[in-house]
Image (cartoon, rainbow, N blue to C red):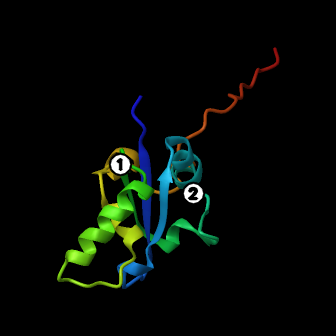
Amino acid sequence: MRVAYFHVRLTPTGQKKLSGDELALDLSQEQLEERFLAPRREGRPITVRGRTYEWDDIERIAVNETEESSEELLPRIQTERRGSKTKAAIPDEWYVAERGRDVTDELVREPPGSALATPAEGPYLFHAAAS
């Protein structure tokens, strides 16, 4: 059975540097749903690394899927970065969140709170006229 790891990168509104993105690495599909996707659909705030965000505070969410965990990917990323002529202050973990297949458009299709905007089916009221 194939194991999938999901990596989430949140860009806070007004964030100028990529190094300020919030990361959640190595999530299972259930954790991704519980911590990010369901709260987004329901318009509920989320917490990442001890910081709580309302969806108005998030400019972008990106979700990538890999077959390898961050523990497996990080040594390769560190080796690649050491060999690169470009030096950036971006943490190695950020590059983990960029690896693999971008599944954002498959998982995030509606605006935050979209589940609340759906008209609910409620009880129908009938008025019976007395004869």
Q: Secondary structure at mark 2?
A: loop
Q: Secondary structure at mark 1?
A: strand
Q: Nearer the viewer, residue 89 or 23?
A: 89
Tell me which residue sits at (68%, 28%) in the image.
124
Structural distance between the alpha carbons of marks 1 and 2? 27 Å
Say which quadrant the N terminus sits in: top left
**Contact flag, marks 1 and 2 (Cβ < 8 Å):** no
Tell me which residue sits at (44%, 59%) in the image.
8
Q: Is residue 51 visible?
A: yes
Q: Nearer the viewer, mark 1 or mark 2?
A: 1
Tell me which residue sits at (43%, 50%) in the image.
6
Q: Is residue 76 left or right of residue 112?
A: left
Q: Nearer the viewer, residue 83 or 94?
A: 83
For label 2, the crowd category at 10 Å Cα-Cα, with few meaning under 14, some 14 to 19 and many 20 or more, is some
Q: Is residue 95 above or below residue 119?
A: below
Q: Is residue 83 above or below residue 122?
A: below
Percent of width and height locating residue 121: 61, 32
- Count the labels in the image: 2
Percent of width and height locating residue 29: 49, 42
Which residue in the structure is indicated by mark 1? 66
Specify the farthest residue to the right.
130
Which residue in the structure is indicated by mark 2? 43
Q: Is residue 18 above or below residue 96?
A: below
Specify the farthest residue to the left.
85
Tell me which residue sits at (51%, 45%) in the image.
28
Q: Amino acid at mark 2?
A: Gly
For label 1, the crowd category at 10 Å Cα-Cα, with few meaning under 14, some 14 to 19 and many 20 or more, is many
Say which quadrant the C terminus sits in: top right
Q: Is residue 104 left or right of residue 56?
A: left
